[in-house]
């Protein structure tokens, strides 16, 4: 969900910036803000849901409430008006291939969305840059065949492949065996990661060590219990 706010009071020194917001008590959520001008900006919130669980329809309201109670955003939007709300659902499963004849996939459209604090942003940005470069080359050659476009897949897997595996593992477990209780515990357990490890997560550099560090007995017990319920 994204909200556009007008009539903001944004300090000029942050106008060129793009911000992530992370709150480890705000379960399963990534938030961001992009400043267009001193008086206009876009806020966004992304959540990770299994298709079997109902979406929370008050997502836009919860984002407004969060912003109105969080420094420095509460000061920026004190007298602002929210003029646009866009709400979309993206896929979470991986494609067989991110390229084909006359076809390239990027970001969420390729199943690049991941559950760790908006961690999928780097995946989306890397893939968008790769797609742009490969498309430019295809236009130069006037050839949009799978053979030419396969460089997009190579760029992605060479750049992200060694990290992306554990993101996919986490995604699969969450989609199949998490309830809200496990989501909340998982989010709080992210505080066990060091600042350097959290920064690595932002860069989509997720390792097995980080995954194991976030797990605890209660979370493992909950996942096991949910798996047994699902099987029987």
Image (cartoon, helix red, strand yellow):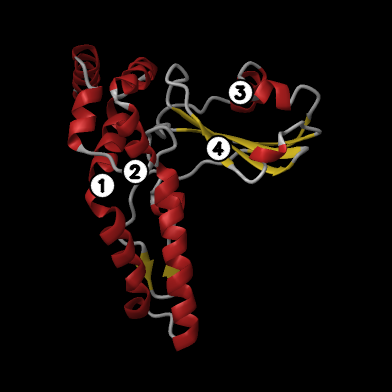
Q: Earlier in the sequence, mark 4 or mark 3?
A: 4
**CA distance for labels 4 and 2:** 16 Å
Instruction: Say whether disc 1 or disc 3 marks the residue closer to the N-terminus.
Output: 3
Which residue, given by chain and number where applicable, does mark 3 sit on? 58
Disc 2 to disc 1, how far (Cα)?
A: 7 Å
Quadrant containing the N terminus is top right
Tell me the tag on residue 204: 2
- Number of marks present in the image shown: 4
Q: Which residue is mark 1?
A: 163
Disc 2 on helix, strand or loop? loop
Is the residue 165 above or below the residue 49 in the image? below
| Residue for point 38% across, 34% down | 115
Q: Closer to the N terminus: mark 4 or mark 2? A: 4
Residue at (37%, 74%) from the top-left corner?
149
Q: CA distance from mark 3 to mark 2?
A: 28 Å
**Are the residues at dot 2 and dot 1 in contact (C-beta closer than 8 Å)?**
yes
Q: Which residue is mark 4?
A: 19
Distance, label 1 to label 3, CA atoms, is 33 Å
Quick one: 71 or 99, which is closer to the camera? 71
Other residues around mark 1 within 10 Å, as few (<14) / some (14–19) / many (≥20): some
Identify the residue at image location x=45%, y=49%.
108
Earlier sequence position, callout 2 versus callout 1? 1
- Circle 3 — which element? loop
Residue 51: percent from the left, percent from the top? 41, 35
SS type, badge 4: strand
Nearer mark to the viewer, of 3 and 2: 2
Q: Position of residue 19 (x, y in %)?
A: 55, 37
């Amino acid at each position: 969900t994204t909200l556009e706010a007008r009539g903001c009071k944004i300090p000029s020194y942050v106008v060129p910036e793009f911000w992530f917001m992370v709150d480890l008590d705000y379960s399963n959520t990534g938030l961001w803000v992009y400043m267009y001008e001193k008086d206009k900006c876009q806020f966004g919130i992304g959540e990770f849901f299994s298709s079997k669980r109902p979406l929370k329809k008050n997502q836009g309201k919860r984002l407004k409430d969060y912003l109105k109670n969080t420094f420095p955003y509460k000061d920026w939007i004190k007298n602002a008006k929210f003029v646009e709300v866009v709400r979309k659902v993206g896929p979470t499963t991986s494609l067989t291939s991110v390229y084909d004849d006359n076809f390239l996939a990027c970001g969420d459209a390729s199943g690049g969305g991941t559950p760790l604090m908006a961690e999928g942003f780097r995946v989306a940005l890397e893939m968008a840059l790769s797609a742009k470069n490969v498309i430019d080359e295809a236009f130069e050659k006037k050839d949009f065949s799978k053979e030419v476009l396969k460089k997009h897949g190579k760029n992605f897997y060479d750049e992200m492949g060694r990290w992306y595996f554990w993101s996919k593992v986490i995604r699969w477990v969450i989609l199949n065996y998490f309830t809200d209780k496990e989501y909340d515990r998982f989010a709080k357990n992210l505080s066990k990661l060091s600042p350097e490890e959290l920064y690595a997560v932002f860069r989509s550099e997720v390792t097995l060590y980080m995954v194991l560090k976030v797990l605890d007995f209660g979370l493992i017990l909950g996942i096991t219990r949910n798996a047994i319920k699902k099987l029987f």
